[in-house]
Amino acid sequence: MNATNALVATTDKNPDVKEFGKKLDVFVLDGNFLNKINKFEEGLKYRITDEELYELFSKYTLGKLDGDWKGIYEDSKSLLAIGLNFDNLNKLIENACFFAEQVLKTSSQKELALRCFYQICSFIAIYIDYVQKELSFLEDSSLREKAFSDGFRYGSRGEAEIKHIIDMSLDFVENYSENGKTTANQARLNIHKDFSKISTDILTQYFSKFDVLKNIFNTAIEFERISMNRNFENHTSSSVEIKGFIGVLLDYYSIDRVIFLNEIKSI
């Protein structure tokens, strides 16, 4: 047959079969692997595909005018490929806010808004999981909390670098513009006020907790599951971690938890 490679699929789970295949330079898909495929295909019955989700976007004809739902969802997915850092994490938190608000505003598309909200929450949880591993060298909990606080407030560059960039810019204004010192001082004061208004304490206190972080990846998986569940149900019967995660985000967005839950009761 002049074949250069061979692959064999078998229901046999005996490890000796794979070892024998290796000796003959034959790749063997054994029974354990085939079972995983069967379980995966079985799971597809209970979830919608990406194509079906995009069909829901297409059916909502006002989605483009009403804030570009599809565009914001696609932007959120693309951030996973761009880089796992605080800049993109903060953008995801902002995008999730958009869909949380749409749950309250759009009576005819609550399910789609919730699906998108849950999916982006899954992305946020993945980012948090990655970030906390990057900060694992900080054994002191207060230092870890400070790192989260700086990340949520100032992004990936952190407080020191952001302030350095601001100071350099304002030094230029001060030295080369009319009334430069007065203008620079006023700008510096206004920038400080704007940063102080960014209340990230809610996010920092919750996501820097060890009990939250140790389960955060499983939380991401659960969010993804309820987002794509074919027989869609809201999160009210989900785990404590899911409820706590959503509650913290709603508090951060200044969205009343009770009002939000009342809006999704019928879904």
Image (tube, rainbow, N blue to C red):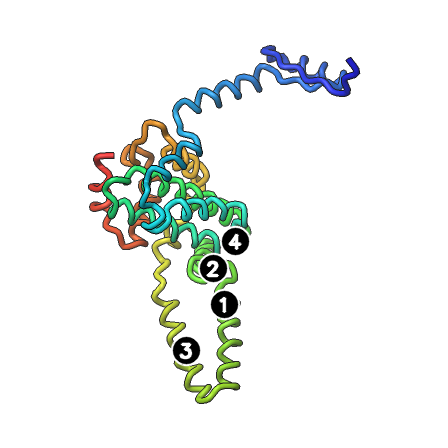
Residue 187: mark in rendering: 3
Check whether the beta carbons of the residues at disc 2 and disc 3 lie within 8 A of each other. Answer: no
| Mark 2–mark 1 CB contact (< 8 Å) | yes
Mark 4 Cα shell of 10 Å, populated few (<14), some (14-19), many (≥20): some
Say what secondary structure mark 3 lies in: helix
The nearer-to-camera label among 4 and 1 is 1
Q: Going by the image, does 232 lie left or right of 149?
A: left
3D distance between C-alphas at marks 2 and 3: 20 Å
Q: Secondary structure at mark 4?
A: loop
The residue at 57%/19% (across/down) is 33
Q: What residue did someone put label 2 on?
A: 155
Q: Residue at x 22, y 42 (%)?
A: 263
| Residue receiving disc 4 | 138
**Alpha-carbon span between mark 1 and mark 3:** 15 Å
The quarter of the image holding the C terminus is top left
Secondary structure state at the residue bearing disc 2: loop
Mark 1 touching mark 3, by CB under 8 A?
Answer: no
Q: Position of residue 228 (x, y in %)?
A: 39, 33
The mark lying in front, picked from 2 and 4, is 2
Disc 2/disc 1 C-alpha distance (Å):
9 Å
